[in-house]
Image: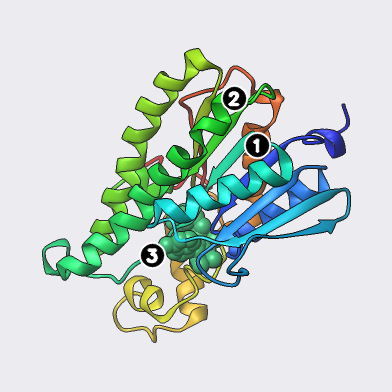
Amino acid sequence: MTPQGRFQGKVVLVTGANGGQGAVHVKRFLEEGANVVALDVAGMPEAPSVTDVGAGQLLECRADVRALADLERAVSAATEAFGGIDIVVANAGINGSRGPAVEFEEEEWLRVLDINLNGVWRTIKAAAPSLLASTKSPSVIIIGSTCAVKGYATSGHYTAAKHGLTGLLKVLSAELAPKGVRVNMINPTTVDTPLIQVQSMYDAFVPPGQEPTAENFRQAMFGLHQMPIPWIDPEDVTAAVMWLASEESRYVTGAQLSVDGGAVLL
Ligand SMILES: NC(=O)c1ccc[n+]([C@@H]2O[C@H](COP(=O)([O-])OP(=O)(O)OC[C@H]3O[C@@H](n4cnc5c(N)ncnc54)[C@H](O)[C@@H]3O)[C@@H](O)[C@H]2O)c1
């Protein structure tokens, strides 16, 4: 089967679909023949709306991963439009503010945990009946982070949430494997999206004595990686998503795939 046909006849649900990475995943799945359910808390129509896009169809809908009812409504709409869901990319996430772990306001701590950890669980829970009914090699891809395996100072809530996803991955992949649903996780390093191109990241990573500018941030980011890069592109994550979503990885489950230029090696 040609790569263009890999996802013909399959239905893919992507959360955070309006973001830097999510939008690229959506585009690639559509190019490769899938019907896509694109969900985001921002930049989406309030009510489910279906349009023809190239070979596939795109169902867009506002959904907050903090609200199980939003996700269940989207799954119902997808079932009505496409018959069900075969692939889930649990991608929605936020950076949160930065600071020492014990100095976060409780509200901010809980906000990051609720979106980045609980939101992934809710997404998979809402899609589970559909995934379990799928006869088309169902696959779940959780978007983690290098913060899922390594501690990063000033990002305690984000790091705790992403480490939590590591635990969720282990349990879900074991529980769902006998039922034919694979669950894997991708741990990207810094990706060049709006999530990192913000002043709070410049302030956190530019060394003392330097202006916290975008260029000094870029230079500082080289220090995170063994490869000579400041960050990766969304397309680098998309390539891993496509492989884990496809039947080329049919016996891969419970895996964490680093796409990080060697960031967690040392
Ligand atoms: N950018 C990076 O450096 C980086 C590195 C490692 C992992 N990640 C992870 O990749 C994923 C995607 O991030 P990105 O880089 O595309 O960031 P982004 O900010 O460009 O996109 C994130 C998207 O998630 C959406 N979102 C936020 N809260 C939501 C909610 N409650 N419900 C539904 N949607 C919500 C946003 O509206 C946005 O469209 C996140 O899980 C993030 O933690 C990012």
Task: Look at label 2 and name its amino acid.
Answer: Ala
Classify 10 Å Cα crowding around label 2: few (below 14), some (14-19), many (20 and above). some
Residue under pointer 1: 84
Residue under pointer 3: 95
Contact between marks 2 and 1 (CB within 8 A): the answer is: yes
User: Residue 112 vs residue 245: left or right?
Assistant: left
Task: Look at label 1 and name its amino acid.
Answer: Gly
Q: Residue at x 57, y 30 (%)?
A: 131
Q: How far is disc 3 from disc 1 in space, using C-alphas?
A: 31 Å
Give residue 59's position: percent from left, percent from top: 70, 55
Q: How far is disc 2 from disc 1 in space, using C-alphas?
A: 8 Å
Give residue 105's position: percent from left, percent from top: 16, 71
Pick whichever, 62 or 108, lies toward us: 62
The quadrant in which residue 166 appears is top left
Q: Residue at x 62, y 41 (%)?
A: 241
Residue under pointer 2: 133
Contact between marks 3 and 2 (CB within 8 A): the answer is: no
**Nearer to us: label 3 or label 2:** 2
